[in-house]
Image (cartoon, grey):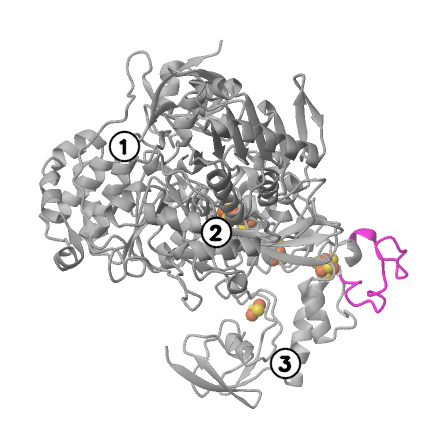
Amino acid sequence: MAGLVTTLGSGAMTNSVHEIRDAGCILAIGTNTTEGHPVIGLEIKKAVDKGAKLIVANPREIDLVRWADLWLRHNPGTDVALLMGMMNVIVDEGLLDSTFIEERCENFDTFKESLKDFDLDTVERITGVPKNQIVEAALIYATNKPSTLLYAMGITQHSHGTDNVIATANLAMLTGNIGKPSTGVNPLRGQNNVQGACDLGALPNVYPGYQAVADPTIREKFETAWGCSLNPSPGLTLTDMFEAISKGQIKAVYLIGENPVLSDPDINHIKESIKALEFLVVQDFFLSETAQMADVVLPTATFAEKDGTFTNTERRVQRVRKAIEPVGDSKPDWWITCQIAQRMSAKGFEFETPSQIMDEIASLTPSYGGISYNRLENGGLQWPCPTQEHPGTPILHTERFARGKGHFVPLEYKPPKELPDDEYPLILTTGRSLFHFHTGTMTRKVKGLNILLEEGPLEINPSDASALGIVDGEMVKVVSRRGEIVAKAKITEVSPAGVVFLTFHFAESSANLLTNPVFDPVSKIPEFKVCAVRVERTH
Amino acid sequence: MNEITLIIDGQEVKAKEGMTVLEAAKEAGIDIPTLCYHPDLTPYGACRLCIVEIENVKGFPTSCTTPASDGMVVKTNTPQIHELRRDIFELILTEHPNFCITCNRKERCQPFDICLRNVSVTERCVICPRNGHCELQDVADSLGVEEVTLPYAYSKELPIERGDPFFDRDYNLCILCGRCVRVCQEVRGRGAIAFTYRGSDALIGTAFGWSLKESECQFCGACVDICPTGALMERTSRWEGVAEYQVVTTCPYCGVGCQLELEVKRGRVIRVNPKRDGTINQGQACVKGRFGIAEFVHHPERLTNPMIRRNGNFEDATWDEALDMIASKLGKYKENNEIAVISSAKCTNEDNYVAQKFTRAVLGTNNLDHCARL
Ligand code: SF4
Ligand code: SF4
Ligand code: SF4
Ligand code: SF4
Ligand code: FES
């Protein structure tokens, strides 16, 4: 989300889910919304029923395509080129919002220079999208205001994901589609509480509310509140952690509710580094692939057995309410951590209820300052919500951008780090299925969901399949430079020729044995959406 | 939107232009029985239960399809309307098991009791999962139907469709209200089910009689939630009966954050319903939230006690043992800044806050991240 921080000053959905239905145009890029965020998919349908124009930009023929006015089937990893091409058309046609740019934004001229490299011929060559479609997309987006832009991991999971995000923000600013109802740049977050985990400072460089660890005044505030001195240097990101573990610099890991053995790129490497640990504590409600490697496993209560809050993709803080007693002798995560802290003689972990924790959060986190359990009784609050009286903020950047002026960033096209060659002639791209969730620790325990999608099939285009002599349903080997897996071939035109697709929910055919562990330099998000593979018959 | 005024049952009622007569009446607290109407769907006018009389309008229009207009004078409950409604409802009941609906013992009858009226087991409400919250029963009560005088023509004898996960379809109980068809098409955009025909009989089903799995169905459960009868019923909670209480909470799967109602009985989650006025989802959910919760929460493989690895194997431990051991070990690695913490996007805000406070204030490091990047 770093791209949005650079351009707009805040890295979250700028608008709210319910505004989507009133949009004049929706540009859905890198999001398979009906599978990844089904209920937001319903909003898109509502908008289309009311006459909104829908542009879908996706290499795969996803479900949304059938409602689309225009489907841009660009080559995987060419989003920057596609968006910059559209912006070039908008500038050429004079469809830009000059007043908005002048009053609210900065650095436009430098940005405009960088558009020169994206003439229609170049963009067509890079993206594989015909020129007339690029023009059409630009015109639809710029002339059917309010236009809302939705994206998900198809934008972020690239080695240049931050550039992709910046491109979306540039497009919205260029046309003044931001800070108003039913507009905006809207990242749809994957897991239920990704937004909250970031908001509450489960990050190496910021305290809750994105307050920088490196800022001495901020640090002082937390030192006073917590009654201790704090480490001024930002810590290691997840990917750097595994590097440090391999090098023996990190020897102990306390892991709460995650399953990196399946979710991270290049699984074999992760497994090796976890084995190298001297001490691993895992807190989870199932014995996940990672928990099996732990020294101590602590059983946790699920969401149904505890109180708390989640913050959804539109920044809405909503209550989680305890419905039943914890199963067995399991305990809520916050309770466990507080116990460990107290046994290490720490003060400030005497919380008796999550509501008390929220009160401390509110006292130290400006954007959550007005949030308390009392106020959450009726449907939640969208941050920023700085005071008890504040009604919450459905739309960001209405008067001014969070960073002051909207910052146009010039961009250049960078191809994915690993492209097909003779040895690995196909592009592998990964994603989610409607029927499973993340690494499947929860959904794969549900029989009916397994019936609906038993194993993650490898989707392959008929032309590639016939060239390889593969028939539908046969088991095939998928090989990359990092590993190989066996999966059932599903022959379908959903995947374009030259591109195969896998989901990442399945331990036995885990796409992340194959993916390329290269990262966006800023966001540190791995390139899950593009790597080179070859497919072989198994007999 | 303009405000209009109409007279319903002699009462002056304010309504907004564009509302139907039924909606205007509902707003004013006037009850008109309905079956095929649902507030989330376009009106359909199929069951005809909602008929009314309107001054200067011939016959008995269905209020769910008639737009309200300024100055309209409406009667919803004259003896004649009442009579007609009962006839209409009886007609619906001739093609539905109806003995129990009109039986004076129904409140006392238990599933395994012997029926005093000798009703076949398959046609008794007590074995229908919808018993107790069935809209046919509600309508029968509100109309005061005590017996069905028309000849019983219930002879569908359709096989129950059991080939799909999560719910069965027993179209013997279907009253052809079309609510499932409309919700699937209008709200979910799928069109997995439609009106089909077997000879001259209308039926609901998938194209070509496929299973739902082979159709466009995404198993969102919207049709199950909207069906007024027991025709569409969730399999796992079929015999669980009525919950002891409900708790509103937030879905633990994706970032949409649907508001869900967890129904609890005997300490277990027996059913999950999307909350009707849920801020985000307004009565909708997806297959994961709707059908994918109870089973993982109560899964036999849930971890139930702390475990410590000794000589390569996990051994059960008490909380005190496990926590003390962790505290002392972490204390050791803390000295050389050799610890990292990985928190979780699955956990609550409060869990994450405590985790980061612990990492920073107690372990003295900022080596802390979660899997959001992924
Ligand atoms: S749907 Fe079930 S409960 Fe309702 S009347 Fe029919 S059999 Fe009885
Ligand atoms: S479960 Fe959802 S998609 Fe399937 S038939 Fe019912 S409404 Fe349609
Ligand atoms: S299955 Fe249920 S919702 Fe569908 S038409 Fe029959 S009674 Fe109505
Ligand atoms: S019910 Fe489905 S769409 Fe709604 S939050 Fe849960 S997983 Fe997401
Ligand atoms: S409710 Fe009006 S016709 Fe059925």
Classify mark 2 as within 8 Å of ligand 2 or not, answering yes or no: yes
Residue A160, which numbered label? 1
Residue A467 lies in what quarter of the image? top left
Q: What residue would you read off at disc 2?
A: B188
Q: Which of marks 1 and 2 is in front?
A: 1
Q: Alpha-carbon distance for marks 1 and 2?
A: 35 Å
Q: Is the magenta stretch mostly helix, strand or loop?
A: loop
Q: Residue A159 in the image: x percent, y percent?
A: 30, 29
Q: Residue B311 in the image: x percent, y percent?
A: 67, 16
Give the residue at x 50% y 48%: B349
- Residue B163 lies left or right of residue A266; in this view the side is right
Quadrant of the drawing holding the C terminus of chain B:
top left
Residue A103 visible in image: yes
Chain under label 1?
A
Q: Alpha-carbon distance for marks 1 and 3?
A: 69 Å
- Are labels 1 and 2 assigned to the same chain? no
Secondary structure of the residue carrying numbered label 3: helix
Q: What residue would you read off at disc 3?
A: B81
Q: Residue B74 in the image: x percent, y percent?
A: 53, 85
**Which range is magenta?**
B98-122
Residue A451 visible in image: no
